[in-house]
Structures are given as structure tokens and as C-alpha cells.
Image: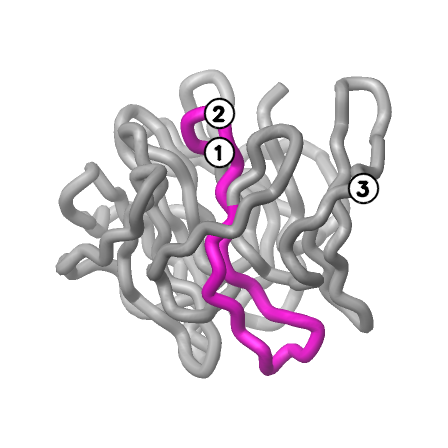
Amino acid sequence: MDGMGDTALGDTWLWNGGAWTELCVAGPSPRWLSMMAPLSGELVLVGGFGVASTTGLAETWTWDGGRWSRLAVSGPSARGGGSMAPLGGELVLFGGFYEAEYSDTWTWNGVAWTQLDVVGPSARAGAAMAPLGGKLVLFGGSNGTTITGDTWTWDGSAWTQLAVSGPPARFWATMVAVDGALVLFGGYSADETFLSDTWTWNGASWTERNAPGPPARANAVMAPF
């Protein structure tokens, strides 16, 4: 339910495997670059930017399959473009940006947000993050002036930077777990071009796959099927 462009959107659509249906439900206000991930049979939506790009949001919403609920909880400050994914029965949110890029780590257990006092990746937004083998893997991102190409893992208590070579620096890449590996596609490069390369991460190393695919793009959506 994100829109990015001249008009931010606030509509909710449901896909049943064969068709889209627009749902007439009240919910989050129009926004873009919010973060959403599943946890315990619900979807959790956090933050984003409102109709005016200068309006940062700090709300937490859940979707139970039939209705949206705004939760009366405190948590991450207003932001968009952070990285959020499930691990070990909770959601982990890292970074994002509003008036600056952030480097904070938060967890959501279904009831409350907790900011963790940990050292990890530098401040950034637009990093790709996905779970694999009991850890979260985070790659790349941007701090507004520098595009990164580092690889980090989160094991539930600490961040670890891995001394591995891999994809060139980028942000707004798309990454998802498929058949026991992570697949990373595209993004926006340090030399300001859209990318169309495909890489896989097996838990120890990155491999570029020489596979024709979609045209170059950034901030795409990808999921296993």
C-alpha cells in the first residue's frame, strides 16, 4: 500500500492467487517507503513518508487479513527506507532515513518495540536484508553520499561484518531466500545507474549468476513461489 511519485497512495489490495481485489477498509494514511514484514500470522507496517515528502511517520500498524489496526506503541522514530525482516519469532528493523540516515537496530515481538544497544552497520537506508540459516543477511545501502557494498549478518544478538567480496556497491537492491540461498537482484549503483545483475549468497560467499533476466531497476519486489 505504498505509492512513490506525484501522489502517495493509501489503498489496500488483496491477491488470492488468481486476481486482485481492492478492499474498502480504513487503514494507514497515504504513504511511501514504509516497511512491511510478516510475523505470527499478521503483517506489520512501520513508518514511511506522508503525502509531503518531508513528513516522516513513526506509526506501527498490523493487518490481520481483514482489517488494519494502529497500535498505541512507541518505537522507531519517523523514517522510511529501513530494512525489516523476521528472525526467531520477532521482526528486526535496521536503519532508514528521515532528516538523516540511521544505524539503530530495533526488534518487534508482537507487543512492543525494543531498541537494542548494539554496534553494527554504519548509518544507511535502502539496504537489502533477508533471513537465511538462522541469521539475517544485510547487504549494501546508502548514507546519502556513500553507496556501500558490505555484507553483515545478525544472529539475534550481534551484528558481524563478513570479510567477503561480492556484488558491487548499491542500494535499493532486492533480496529473498530461494532453495537454501539468497538471491539478490538489481539496485542503484555508486555511479548512478540502475543494475540488472543477479547474485546468490550460500551462507559463506557471493556468486554472480550469468543469467539473463529483468531489465535494470531498483526497489523492485521479489518473493519465493
The image quarter containing residue 21 is top right
Q: How far apart are the alpha carbons under marks 1 and 3?
A: 22 Å
Q: Residue at x 36, y 51 (%)?
A: 93
Q: How far apart are the alpha carbons under marks 1 and 2?
A: 7 Å
Crowding at mark 2 (Cα within 10 Å: few <14, some 14-19, many 20+): few
Q: Is residue 52 left or right of residue 183?
A: right
Choose mark 1 or mark 2, whichever is in front.
2
Crowding at mark 3 (Cα within 10 Å: few <14, some 14-19, many 20+): few
Label 1 sits on residue: 38
Label 2 sits on residue: 41
Choose mark 1 or mark 3, whichever is in front.
3
The image quarter containing residue 69 is top right
The amino acid type of the residue labelled 3 equals Cys
Q: How far apart are the alpha carbons under marks 2 and 3?
A: 21 Å
Q: Is residue 41 magenta?
A: yes
**Residue 223, numbered label:** none
Front-most of 65 and 121?
65
Q: Residue at x 15, y 47 (%)?
A: 158
Front-most of 223 and 33?
33
Q: In the rendered image, is residue 142 in sight? A: no
Label 3 sits on residue: 24
The amino acid type of the residue labelled 1 equals Pro
Q: Which residues are magenta?
A: 39-61
Give the image location of residue 37, x and y in percent.
49, 40
Crowding at mark 1 (Cα within 10 Å: few <14, some 14-19, many 20+): some
Give the image location of residue 84, x and y in percent.
42, 47
The image quarter containing residue 117 is bottom left
Q: Is residue 90 left or right of residue 172?
A: left
Q: Is residue 3 left or right of residue 208?
A: right
